Image (cartoon, helix red, strand yellow):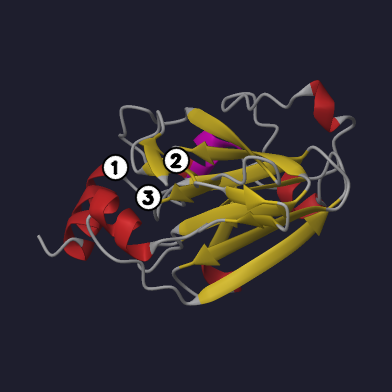
Amino acid sequence: MNIRELSIPDSYEITPIQRADDRGVFLEWYRFDLLEKVIGHPLALRQANTSVSKRGVVRGIHFADVPLGQAKYVTVTRGAVLDFVIDIRVGSPSFGKWDSVRLDDVERKAIYLAEGLGHAFVALSDDATVSYLVTDTYNASKEHGINPLDPAVALVFPEEAGPLLLSPKDTDAPGIDDAAAAGLLPSWDSMRAYYNSLNGQ
């Protein structure tokens, strides 16, 4: 597989090698050893999630308190989504910026994002099935959100998504500046220290 760092530090696009014949396709969609070489430490996976979304559904921007936070390894097993990683680390050179990767059942890419980054996606097809591995179990008291329509973040949703469908939880979430002012967001320096601790430094 090919692993490419995105424009947001500590996030990566993973493109698997697909082997097809007249029976179908085989691929490795997750390899802990290859990812470890890139990020510097193995993932301690604690939960696996799957969501199924109608076309136009937006989920996120979500993040969790660190420690432990939730690093995520995300792929699509049916349909297509545009997956976003958002830098919400106060003091980061790319604070408030984002990058995106189309995840679908054709190229079968995945995306990895480290703890302390924001995550969102928009479904580009009906029954878009997203599966992701995470490094901590769900804890409602440690989960937070940023409004995905916040103009300060300015996510760009493709026309392919059609009319957007969002939950009240996401539309009621604060903008990134209000979340920072409330002390909800991690800092760049604290996250660098946390990543170094995971890497044994």
Region in magenta: 175-179
Which residue is situated farthest in the front direction here?
22
Q: Position of residue 146 (x, y in %)?
A: 60, 44
Contact flag, marks 1 and 3 (Cβ < 8 Å): yes
Verify whether residue 83 appears in magenta. no
Q: Write the residue at 69% across / 65% down.
A: 50
CA–CA distance in space, label 3 to label 2: 7 Å
Identify the image quadrant of residue 91: top left
Whether residue 171 appears in this view of the structure is yes
Amino acid at circle 2: Ile
Which class describes the residues within 10 Å of circle 3: few (<14), some (14-19), or many (20+)?
many
As helix, strand or loop, the secondary structure at mark 3 comes to: loop
Which class describes the residues within 10 Å of circle 2: few (<14), some (14-19), or many (20+)?
many
Amino acid at circle 3: Pro
CA–CA distance in space, label 1 to label 3: 7 Å
Q: Position of residue 44 (x, y in %)?
A: 37, 73
The reply, left or right, for residue 79 in relation to residue 155 is right
Q: Which residue is mark 1?
A: 188
Q: Which residue is mark 3?
A: 186
Which of these two is toward me, 186 or 109? 109
Amino acid at circle 1: Trp
Q: Write the residue at 54% across / 75% down.
A: 47
Which of these two is toward me, 31 or 181? 31
As helix, strand or loop, the secondary structure at mark 1 comes to: helix
Q: Position of residue 197 (x, y in %)?
A: 18, 63
Q: Which residue is mark 2?
A: 88
